[in-house]
Image (cartoon, rainbow, N blue to C red):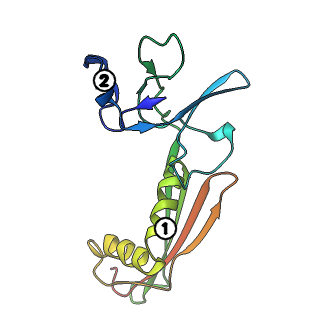
């Protein structure tokens, strides 16, 4: 199936032209369900039960008798998520506070994080996340590198980070 990776549903208003498409994907029917498979999504994991369609919206299926574009469903709202748990701990208002952060990425968000982790070192990821917190908490410092657990079967990534805050109060 031919798709346009940026114009998506606006292809509906185009006149027929071979220049409407810039990418090729596969439409497969498996056990009565249609899957739109993009083999260029290198870091996509999980089984077909957790699969989400790529966000191209329209395709020209290359088969005899095709006369119009076919709709590709948009990824469902539950195709990906990020949960963040922040736990602050401290003895009293005079001592340093520890911040433990657990970020859980699922589905398409896990795929995006997996891609990011492939192209970014843990040190750079740590600096980026530290800078996020330092905007509102200038006395924060990282307590080691993030710990990454990538469960590719369930397409879930859990990143655990630890910080020290010398003057939270």
Residue in the picture at 50% in, 36% down:
25
Q: For numbered disc 1, what is the local secondary structure? A: helix
On the image, the x and y values in percent for residue 156 come to: 61, 55
Q: Which mark is residue 80?
A: none
Crowd tier of the residue under label 2, counting other residues whose Cα lies within 10 Å: few below 14, some 14–19, many 20 or above? some
Q: For numbered disc 2, what is the local secondary structure? A: helix
Above or below: residue 42 compared with residue 75 = below
Residue bearing mark 2: 11
With 154 as the anchor, is 19 left or right in this view?
A: left
On the image, the x and y values in percent for residue 37 come to: 56, 37
On the image, the x and y values in percent for residue 154 come to: 67, 51
With 93 as the anchor, is 27 left or right in this view?
A: right
Crowd tier of the residue under label 1, counting other residues whose Cα lies within 10 Å: few below 14, some 14–19, many 20 or above? some
Above or below: residue 37 compared with residue 168 = above
Residue bearing mark 1: 117
Above or below: residue 54 compared with residue 18 = below
Depth check: give the residue in front, 24 or 126. 24
Q: Could you say which quadrant of the image residue 166 lies in?
A: bottom left
Depth check: give the residue in front, 50 or 38. 38
Residue in the picture at 55% in, 71% down:
160
Q: Earlier in the sequence, mark 2 or mark 1?
A: 2
Depth check: give the residue in front, 96 or 46. 46
Task: Between label 2 and label 1, give the one nearer the viewer.
Answer: 2
Q: How many labels does the image show?
A: 2
Residue in the picture at 29% in, 30% down:
19
Residue in the picture at 30% in, 76% down:
134
Location of the C terminus (image quadrant): bottom left
Measured in 3D between alpha carbons, the distance from the residue under mark 2 to the one under mark 1, in whole angstroms, is 34 Å
On the image, the x and y values in percent for residue 11 come to: 30, 23
């Amino acid at each position: 199936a031919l798709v346009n990776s940026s114009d998506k549903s606006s292809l509906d208003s185009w006149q027929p032209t071979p220049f409407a498409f810039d990418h090729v994907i596969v439409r497969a029917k498996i056990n009565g369900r249609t899957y739109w498979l993009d083999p260029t999504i290198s870091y996509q994991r999980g089984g077909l039960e957790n699969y989400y369609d790529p966000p191209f919206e329209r395709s020209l299926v290359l088969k005899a008798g095709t006369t119009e574009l076919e709709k590709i469903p948009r990824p469902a709202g539950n195709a990906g998520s990020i949960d963040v748990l922040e736990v602050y701990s401290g003895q009293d208002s005079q001592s340093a506070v520890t911040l433990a952060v657990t970020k859980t990425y699922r589905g398409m968000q896990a795929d995006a994080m997996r891609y990011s982790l492939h192209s970014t070192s843990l040190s750079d990821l740590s600096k980026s996340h530290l800078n996020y917190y330092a905007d509102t908490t200038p006395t924060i410092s990282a307590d080691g590198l993030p710990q990454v657990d990538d469960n590719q079967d369930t397409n879930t990534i859990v990143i655990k980070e630890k910080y020290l805050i010398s003057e939270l109060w």
